[in-house]
Amino acid sequence: MSLFNIPGAALGLAALGLATAADAQAINGRYDGTSCSSDYRGELALDIAWPVITFYESECQVTGTVAGAVNTYTTTCSGEGSTWDGQIGLWPQVDGSLVLDLYGETTTYSRCQ
């Protein structure tokens, strides 16, 4: 299966500048770790408008890739009056969901319509 046939898989290539803008947008959208209810934004809500990742109470700007770590990116984040640098792992799944690794803890997010 081609990498570009997997929804959002172009993310890693886009971060390296090897994919088109359209490929980078494949991962853009709203995700939720619990329920994709349209009338409630839960604490596990996640919005991606590459290269910005917005969580419930914070926002991260993807600033680069981590050498030797597939689908892992450096970030500068802010929220609740603080700013910090970090890393985030993003693994798009064939079913459209997204596995996110933040500080060694993984969460699977469903893509919301």
Image (cartoon, grey):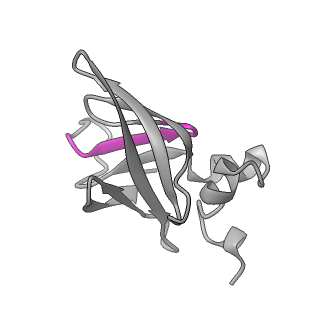
Image point (49%, 41%), residue name: 48
Image point (37%, 41%), residue name: 86
Nearest the eye: 20 or 63: 63
Query: Is residue 12 depicted above or below 77 in this figure?
Result: below
- Magenta segment's dominant SS is strand
Reply yes or no: does residue 42 show up in magenta. no
Reply yes or no: does residue 46 show up in magenta. yes
Query: Is residue 103 depicted above or below 85 in this figure?
Result: below
Image point (69%, 51%), residue name: 16
* Residue 20 falls left or right of residue 99: right
* Residue 65 falls left or right of residue 30: right
The image quadrant of residue 18 is bottom right
In the rendered image, residue 3, in percent from the top left (x then y), is placed at: 68, 73
* Residue 23 falls left or right of residue 104: right
Quadrant of image for the N terminus: bottom right
Q: Which residues are magenta?
A: 43-52
In the rendered image, residue 88, in percent from the top left (x then y), is placed at: 40, 50
